[in-house]
Image: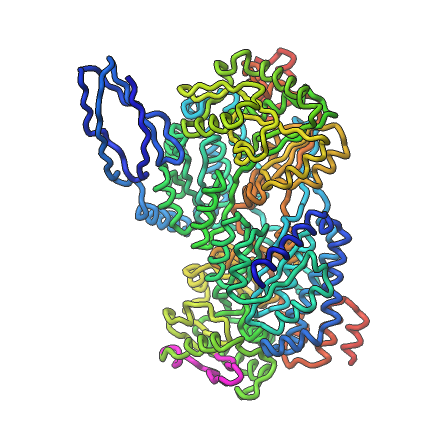
Amino acid sequence: MVISFDCRIDASMSMTLSSLTLNKSGSLHIAQTCLSMPSRHQSWRLLCSPICSASLSLVVEEKRGTFNRDNANKLVKDLKKVFNTGKTKTYEWRMSQLTNMLKMIEENEADIYRALYKDLSKPESEAFISEIAMTTGSCKLALKELDQWMKPQKAKTTVTTYPSSAQIVSEPLGIVLVISTWNYPFLLSLDPVIGALAAGNAVVLKPSEIAPASASLLSKLFQEYLDSSAIKVVEGAVDETTALLEQKWDKIFYTGNGRVGRIIMAAAAKHLTPVILELGGKCPVVVDSNTNLQVSAKRIVAGKWGCNNGQTCIAPDYIITTKDFAPKLIDALKNELLEFFGENPMKSKDMSRLVNLYHFKRLTSLMDEVSDKIVVGGQRNEEKLKISPTILLDVPENSQIMQEEIFGPLLPILTVENVKDSFDMINSRSKPLAAYIFTSDEELKKDFVRDIYAGGMLINDTILHLTVDSLPFGGVGESGMGSYHGKFSFDSFSHKKGVLYRAFTGDSPTRFPPYTPVKLRLLKALISGDIFQVLLSMIG
Amino acid sequence: MDQVEMSINLSELRQSLSSGRTRDAAWRKSQLQAILRLLNENEDQIFQALQHDLGKHPVEVYRDEIGVVKKSAIYALSCIDKWMATKNSQLPWLFFPSRAEVLPEPLGIVLIFVSWNFPITLALDPLVGAISAGNTVVIKPSELAPETSAFLAKTIPVYLDSKAIKVVEGGVDIAGNLLQQKWDKIFFTGSARVARIIMAAALNHLTPVILELGGKCPTIVDSLSASLDLKVAAKRIAAGKWGACNGQACIAIDYILVEHKFSSTLVELLKKTVQRFYGENVKSLKNLSKIVNKHHFNRLCNLMEDPAVASSIVYGGKIDEENLIIEPTILLDPPLDSEIMQEEIFGPLLPIITLDKIKDSIEFINSRPKPLAIYAFTKDDAFKKAIVTETSSGSVTFNDTIIQFVCDGLPFGGVGQSGFGRYHGKYSFDAFSHEKAVLHRSFHLELGARHPPWIDFKMKFLRLAYMYDYWGLILLYLGLKR
């Protein structure tokens, strides 16, 4: 017999089963199904064997907080003390931390794969590409370029400040909070931290509790490899994050969704803390009939189902194509799905699962609302938290699946008469984090790049632009603010201080009173750069 | 303006944006030229408005307001084609044949909140940036500078594209209404208190903000031996305190740090300079702006009322309540816990704090919130280096004051409590742009190793690929790599 129950408890409470009466003897298991999001909604199953009847009572107790406001306060104070010694500003310290971070990742690859498999059933190759390789790449780039990045830049001066020289000096902001998320728990924790360290800051990382194995591995590894007086990991959920957010940070870097992004910004506003918000959105893919269909389909499938099974901020969310081309596209996608995941994708080892029951239920309800539009897939397995790659055709624009970011293996295809009709459709929605187009038509490409507003864009591929270090990665509008990767990370966590060196000579008399009409004429002439006027005014 | 009018305005701005008009270089240039014409043809009216609102002398107005905006517009006009151009980004060979670029695009509809102390500059300088970047704009001038506000509201629609650039006048209520709308960026100059309100409203639409705030800008004065240097320093200090809106400027000198043994020399020199520049009698001072209103006048008088503060006054202290004038006032070592040393002064009171050693000034500054600017008069290169590397501020200027404001090669903005975001020169263009990353890929050379099913070969390939080990990749393909 199975008793299932759901309940809502406050996150600072824990629930204890205080009594269970069985009418027959039998063994009893209590199994918590995956932690859900928001974390206040939890599900348990009680399994009795052999079958019996039972009543149960539950006691809700207040949990002794493991990390509260006082802890957060002390944490920030301690970090400030360390930062003020100037240790983290030195080139040597930054290089040592980056070197150790690189070692940390390389020496613990196997453990990282294990944690990712536990949290997300992520296949090893996928984990290598998206988590290991990218982070070691960032470390290596920072190690190679740091001395260049740290150098002051010369700035141009003009006649307005003559004689003078100017430079822009990069300095750390101070104590930085990085709040990471669950879908790429290593990448999205380490990449911002690498930037923050390269820029000379002290850092607190708050990994996501929804990927608990990764969070605790990060905590353990950071303590082993990095300078724990200046770099800390705080594990936990809503309470711990709230306690952290009450403190005054010099910058907050958040990856996640818009709802929590607003909470972060509200907390930041109290201390006038600048923020970087890497959010999401519905990333559209426009597919023109004038395209290489096979390669397009491959790249769409790779971007949608090959990356954490759609649970990626830049995953293709939905497709727009022409009515005539849709059937061909669907066939091509089917073929590639077969290639990638075989006849029965639910059994394929190469497909990640959904992170937890909450998201599973969310996605199945999106699917069920428009179940008559499913043309491929639609299978589900609640126990394994899997949904097969599912394609839907022409869902209504006001259906829920077209209202929220899908973040899962469902791919709606919307059709239009003319491929250019897709532009208005996209621009009428919030600006997405990424926008994609597949076409061989050069004019169409140009129009797309010029007319579509998005964080970033990729022509004839998906996802890849994330890996290009020389491109800034970030959103615009609802998809976020700020950017990072490569040198942009270093810059995002730095303050660029202007420094002007003036000599004691070279004052224009117009600077000081008494203010005479002659001075006014001279000033006007100087501003407009009119040498003749300048001379005239000086002669009077 | 009520909610209905506001939504009509905003929908007009949205239409202008979606028509694509503001994206054309021609439109942007025409608007920048219109700003120049506006300034050229209305100089007298601007002088009058600023005389009324702040008692500013026309030379000060031209130097700090009209001239500054003209410089910015002229500079933007000369650079805008370059700024708008797509920039190519480097790609590793592995991506061949691909192309990466960054394309600046407008953010959309921008809201500019203007402060009252430089009511022309702080409206039009950000406007130059917003227009250069192709946005539509709403300007909300400060109601505390009412004549200038009315001037802008009247003149901007005449010279600029009134369907793309609008002025909304009003006080707190109007500001509140504006903040409820959805903006693509908000640019705010003002106090930290109001900045918190702005940011708290902006988050509802995840609107990014630039906050140009203030702080207590310290001026370190090292013992200067050459008398010529001393005279120049005194003039620049006087100009930096009283010459720009009579101390009511975010980058005005707030207080001075000087070595004890040098303080009397400095005080005497400043007294002479002040008398020469501004006069001696509070009823007949010249070349000085007035205090903007009764509220700030009373606030400043209260700062002087603390007996410990009053007794530290070594020059000045007299007031003319009717005309809202406070004469240039110098204080020597007021108590550090007095309000005058805790709050941003924003007025003509200049505390001089003496230290045993001038190098102690670094610790003094570091124990306080990060200011918008640090000034230091010194010829000691090692000391200069220490100041730059050991303190943090929006900017640092050596041997002068205020003037970094007109250096377009330097980003102008704060850090910590003095704000975030920056502008001036190209930074203005960037502040109002989104840098969109674009990667162009070809259909050729599709790398099968990118996709499942995951087999051993693909893993080896990926390892080599991510290290850009091209030779290793060749060997792998030839079957020669183990």
Residue range of the region highlighted in magenta in the rendering: B308-329
Extreme residue toward the right, this view: A532
Q: Is residue B481 magenta?
A: no
Q: Nearer the viewer, residue A214 or B268?
A: A214
The residue depicted at 56 percent of the width and 30 percent of the height is A315
Q: How far from the left and from the top, in percent, is residue B260?
A: 43, 73
Q: Is residue B321 magenta?
A: yes
Q: Say above or below: A234 vs A318.
A: below
Q: Residue at x 59, y 50 (%)?
A: B184
In the figure, A63 relative to A505: above or below?
above
> Residue at coordinates 30% horizontally, 40% vertically from top-left?
A12
Q: Quadrant of the C terminus of chain A?
A: bottom right
Say which quarter of the image contains residue A484.
top right
Q: Quadrant of residue B153?
A: bottom right
Of residue B243 and residue B355, the one placed in the foreground of this image is B243
Nearest to the observer: residue A52 or residue B181: A52
At which x and y percent is residue A192? 50, 39
* Quarter of the figure with the N terminus of chain A: top left
